[in-house]
Image (spheres, rainbow, N blue to C red):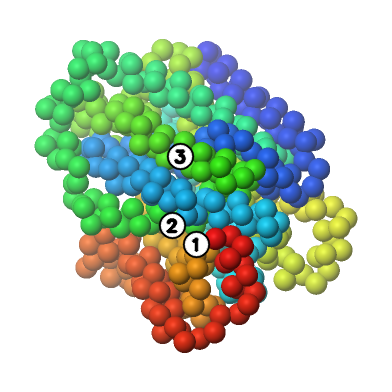
Amino acid sequence: MTLKLWDWMVIIAFFMAMVAIGVWAHFKNKDSSDYFIASGGLPWWLSGISHHVSGYSGAVFVAYAGLAYTHGFSIYVWWAMTVGISILMTINVFPVRWVRLRKKFAIQSPLEYLSVRYGIKTQQVMAWSGVLLKLFDVAAKWAAIAILLRVFTGVPILYGVLFSGGISIIYITIGGLWAVTISDFIQFIVQIGAGIALFIATITKLGGIESVFTIWDQLPERNSEFFAEPYTVGFALAFLCINTFSYNGGTWNLATKYISSPDESNTKKAAILSGTLYLIWPLILFFPMWAAPVLLPGLTDPTESYGLLTIHLLPPGVVGLVLASMFATTMSMTSSDANTIAAVIIRDILPVQLKKYKLIKSINSLQIARWVTFVFVFFTIVIATQYESFGGILGLIVSWFAALVGPIAVPMLLGMLPAFKKCGAVAALCAIFLGFLSFIFTKIYAANLSYTLEVGLPLFISLLVYVGIGFLNYKKKVSKKVIDLLKAID
């Protein structure tokens, strides 16, 4: 398809707005605290929307759209609903502790407190592991948006990755967290407008609002089921556990949204807003994807369904709005990830690895932050060009990221809770190592394992090992600095 003039005008206007926000934020940032955590000044509504939007990407409109086409309603149950529940059921546990860590220990990176909690060596293992993991996760987002661009314009995926990544790397590098969150708000408005436009176009095509309920009779029976193989009850429960760790800070950029809040009250409101949006908004967003088998029967590549629906149902200009919203969701997540990863590298890794770093930091910390951000995003673009080698987009998002986030997130989040004070550095390192080892096991023997076990085993092994070693250490004395840390944030 060739985009019409109005579509290009909308897309260009969107990118100009994003660049303008980045330039504005460039001059607003005075130091690394502004760049990484907005100096703790994010209002709850902005933090909540940013937390929510940062959980989406163009992959939702590609990989998840394909699953909505083939498996129907179950995508909402095991993904959106579990995310919403995992956030709302822990609002008094993790969000408040993140903001207390900033207020009492002046952290700018989610991993800074780990040097006290587990020691420098353990912190370094977690930092390096998480940075490498995020390379693949962000790469999946570039590949997803490239596939959408191919559907709309026919541009080859390689060029799509280079185009979307090349434009975004400029915006991501010059902006800090203020740029990320304010652009998230703009992107949320664009996403809402585009999603509602396609929802209205879909129900109009199907005969009216009643089609929301009647469409299921025209779809395969399993498309209306809450759980469809291989996305079973067990898979949804496994994903609930994974999301509980991921969306409460195991995914580092989401922890940053809580860290940047002014106080506990604001951070709890932000969590409630984000969790509620996850329960409500995907029902509207996914409906056109669920209806796609009726409107576009017999697709050979279901991952193209959302893009094709947009082309067939929406007029020029609105098509550009939808494409802009897809760029927006990807840019939101990737910019947020890059900002947080840069904080981890600069605050946690470089001070340990480079003896002269303190001198460099005192000269120009902002420039270092921007260079680190640029290099990180550059490597994600390189990996994105080879996405098929890692099992495609769904493989990168579900099999790689979901399976690997647990081993790092378990000691990171549970380490904040007094109940696990006996779980020290040995427990953390064993949980990470054996969790990664179980991931390798699932990849070797994937054909003989259920999808639930393939995705959930690394998390469960890490959790079992971490808690088990802590139990065996019940007689071991905990250091005073760890006790003081836990008391300060409890």
- What residue is shown at x 46% (from left), y 48% (from top)? 91
Determine the CA span between mark 2 and mark 3: 16 Å
- Residue 155 visible? The answer is no
Q: Which mark is residue 413?
A: 1
Q: Is residue 320 above or below residue 437?
A: above
Picture coordinates of residue 17, whole percent (x, y): 64, 25
Q: Residue at x 57, y 46 (%)?
A: 264
Q: Amino acid at mark 1?
A: Leu
Q: Identify residue type, mark 2.
A: Phe
Alpha carbon separation for disc pair 2 and 1:
7 Å
- Would you say the residues marked 2 and 1 are in contact, meaning their CB atoms lie under 8 Å apart? yes
Instruction: Give yes or no for contact between labels 2 and 3 (Cβ–Cβ under 8 Å).
Output: no
Residue nearest the observer in this picture, 414 or 12: 414
The kind of residue on which mark 3 rests is Ile
Which residue lies under the disc numbered 2?
245
Q: Secondary structure at mark 3?
A: helix
Relative side of 453 to 183, left or right: left
Badge 1 density bin: few <14, some 14–19, many ≥20, Cα 10 Å: many
